[in-house]
Image (cartoon, rainbow, N blue to C red):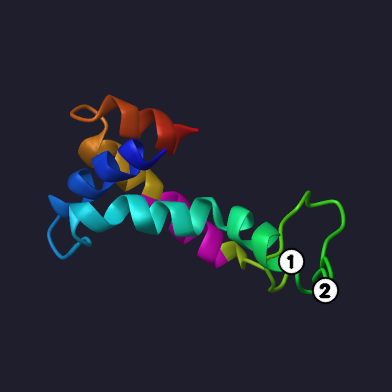
Amino acid sequence: GAEKAIRMTRFLGQMEGVTPIDIESVPCVWKSVVKYKDSLKASNNSQQQRRRLDPLHHDSQRSGPTERPYTPELLSSMSDMLINLISKWGDRHLRLRKMLEG
């Protein structure tokens, strides 16, 4: 929940080049992003239901393409980046390593 988002914000804020939002704002942003459906339900009571782009994707009201056509070169680059992150941070941050390794 919001507590994990705060921990992630603090962790990412330690990285060079990362400027996170104020800690006090994290719960509000988390709620806006993760719990957006609650506000949609309230607004849909008085509005017409929006068309689902992908009927198999539960209640998502998000728009945009459903396919992500990654090239083999881009997939290889992303894989290399994840391997480098695991090598650099994996021994010091075991939870991050577990997430990156899937």
Q: Magenta stretch: dominant SS? A: helix
Q: Is residue 55 above or below residue 43?
A: above
Q: Quadrant of the N terminus?
A: top left
Residue situated in front as seen by the camera: 43 or 61: 43
Residue positioned 47% across, 59% down in the render: 32
Q: Which residue is mark 2?
A: 48
What amino acid is at disc 2? Gln
Q: Quadrant of residue 66?
A: bottom right
State the image coordinates of residue 87 (x, y, percent, origin top left).
27, 37
Q: Quadrant of residue 93?
A: top left
The span from disc 2 to disc 1 (Cα, nearest Å) is: 6 Å
Badge number at residue 44 = 1
Magenta-tinted stretch:
73-81
Could you tell me if residue 66 is visible in this image?
no
What amino acid is at disc 1? Asn
| SS of the residue under disc 2 | loop
Q: Is residue 66 above or below residue 48?
A: above
Proximity of marks 2 and 1: CB atoms separated by less than 8 Å: yes
Q: Is residue 70 left or right of residue 93?
A: right
Badge number at residue 59 = none
